[in-house]
Image (spheres, rainbow, N blue to C red):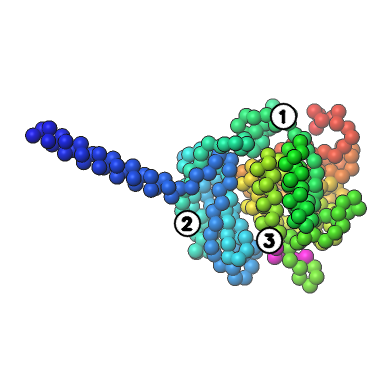
Amino acid sequence: MKINIFRKLSGALIILAILSCFLNACSSGDVQSIEQWGVYELTLNGPSEGNPYMDNALEAKFTNGPNTVTVPGFYDGNGIYKIRFSPDQQGRWTYVTQSNLAELNDLKGSIRCVEATGNNHGPLKIINTFYLEYADGSTFYSVGTTAYQWTSVKKSIQEQTVSTLAESPFNKIRMCVFPKNYSYGNDTEPWMLPFKKKDEKNDPSHPNYEFFQNFDQRIKQLMELGVQADVILFHPYDIWGYYQMGKEMNERYVRYLIARLSAYRNVWWSLANEWDVPRTKEAIDWEGIGSLLQQEDPHQRFRGIHNWYYDESHFFDHSRPWITHVSAQTYFFFNAIKW
């Protein structure tokens, strides 16, 4: 009798074990796996009425054990809202959304962060004051170039640029968000402007979402090539008025880029290409923009600012807490350790 009971109990336990495994498999199958330092993108449908760029707010809190990261979301046109997050720790992350829109508020889910593979070495970090290395400890030696407005020229040239970089030794590129118009560069009309026009003037309250989607794609392509993208937020070589958007729109634009780009591990923030050119020096609150990035970027990407004149008197005060590294245009590199 004892043997029969044991066999019945054993059979029941086996059935329960199989059922448990099945349920766990079903449960884990619903959870998306993201590589450590990869990009998780949550896409949500919401209202498109009015001006979502100006009126609607969205964020999500991602939690892994004692660690919580608050990540801003953004509107991507056609009723699509997105949140991008790059997990820096392996394991299960849960999230919950917050929004002024009822249909986007208090949405919950989870992702599983798994080990990085291939050439995913994570974002760069500063070590021993003077050096850079990847988050996984791999070495990094910067060999940089510039292609200021390559994302503003026609798309066939953009694709050619990606192909050229793939065959080049460069692992870092300085690049502008806004198009440039200047003597030593390109004076052709961009394939698309970042913002729509109103009464023939730049309207910073209405983005051209296709422009920013294309910019996302280029940053992602660089990431896959292992190229760091030093993203230049403002510059003075401008006939469209992007350096004259005003404090409110400057901050909204920077917050929008944080939401769109910060999750990409290859992104650096460069506040300016040549901040000390008089018209931008007086038009933009550099300290305010730098502090905003420090306080609101959930992934804490590098932050720098770049000068026009070569001498030290035109360097921004690099003792400011929001500056992570020196980006100097100068002949006097023997001063590098001092800087």
**Label 1: which residue?**
131
At label 3, which amino acid type do we have? Glu
Task: Identify the secondary structure beneath mark 1.
Answer: strand
Which residues are the magenta region?
Answer: 202-209
SS state under label 3: helix
> Residue 6, located in which quarter of the rendered image?
top left
Left or right of 5? Residue 193 is: right
Q: Position of residue 212 (x, y in %)?
A: 69, 57
Quick check: can you spot residue 267?
A: no
Where does label 2 land, which residue?
Answer: 107
Prevalent SS, magenta region: strand
- Using the rendered view, name the quadrant where residue 266 is placed: top right
Q: Residue at x 38, y 45 (%)?
A: 25
Q: CA distance from mark 3 to mark 1?
A: 37 Å
Answer few, some or many: residues within 10 Å of disc 1's Cα (few below 14, many 20 plus, some between 14 and 19): few
Q: Position of residue 272 (x, y in %)?
A: 79, 48
**Crowd tier of the residue under label 3, counting other residues whose Cα lies within 10 Å: few below 14, some 14–19, many 20 or above:** some
